[in-house]
Amino acid sequence: MGDTNMFKSNMGETKTRFNNSLKTALTEFGGEVQRYSVTLTPVDTGDLRGSSYTGEPESNNNSGLKVEVGYERDVLPENAYSVYVHERTELHHDVGQAKFLETALQTKEPEFLPYLKMSVKRDMGL
């Protein structure tokens, strides 16, 4: 009995460490996407760049974890200036570009799995 309880305890601790490692890696990588998208964000007053954020990890309907990266966190999408600037590809910008967040995510995406693997190995002591 003692060995079984010890095994269950160790598995529980390992699962917790693994989940915490995933959350940390998602948040860190979300921050990377955010920082890169800011460099691509058009500048008028600078307020849009300053409204970027990376959220906390959340469960995604029991199918995994998600981290939200975006702009104007407390503004409804239909009222968001960031959506207007992001989607209007016909607008000219002296600095930055349309699709700044989409481009950042597409550019960084190939780095995600190697980053996740490295982070989990580091955090799990492997």
Image (cartoon, rainbow, N blue to C red):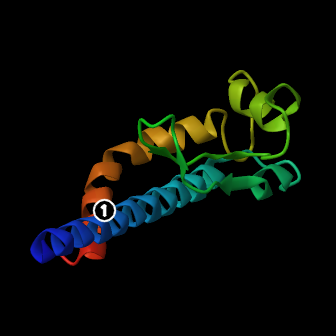
Q: Position of residue 107 (x, y in %)?
A: 43, 43
- The N terminus sits in image quarter: bottom left
In the image, is 58 to the left or to the right of 97?
Answer: left
Q: Mark 1 — residue?
A: 15
In the image, is 13 to the left or to the right of 8?
Answer: right
In the image, is 62 to the left or to the right of 89?
Answer: left
In the image, is 119 to the left or to the right of 48?
Answer: left
Mark 1, secondary structure of its residue: helix
Q: Position of residue 41 (x, y in %)?
A: 69, 47
Can you tell which quarter of the image residue 55 is in? bottom right
Please tell me which residue lies in front, 54 or 33: 54
Q: Amino acid at mark 1?
A: Lys
Q: Residue at coordinates 10% horizontally, 74% vertically from top-left?
A: 3
Q: Position of residue 15 (x, y in %)?
A: 30, 62
**In the image, is residue 104 above or below residue 45?**
above
**In the image, is residue 87 above or below residue 41?**
above
Residue at the outermost top position: 90
**Does residue 92 appear in this view?**
no
Q: Residue at coordinates 33% horizontally, 52% vertically from top-left?
A: 111
Q: Residue at coordinates 32% horizontally, 59% vertically from top-left?
A: 115
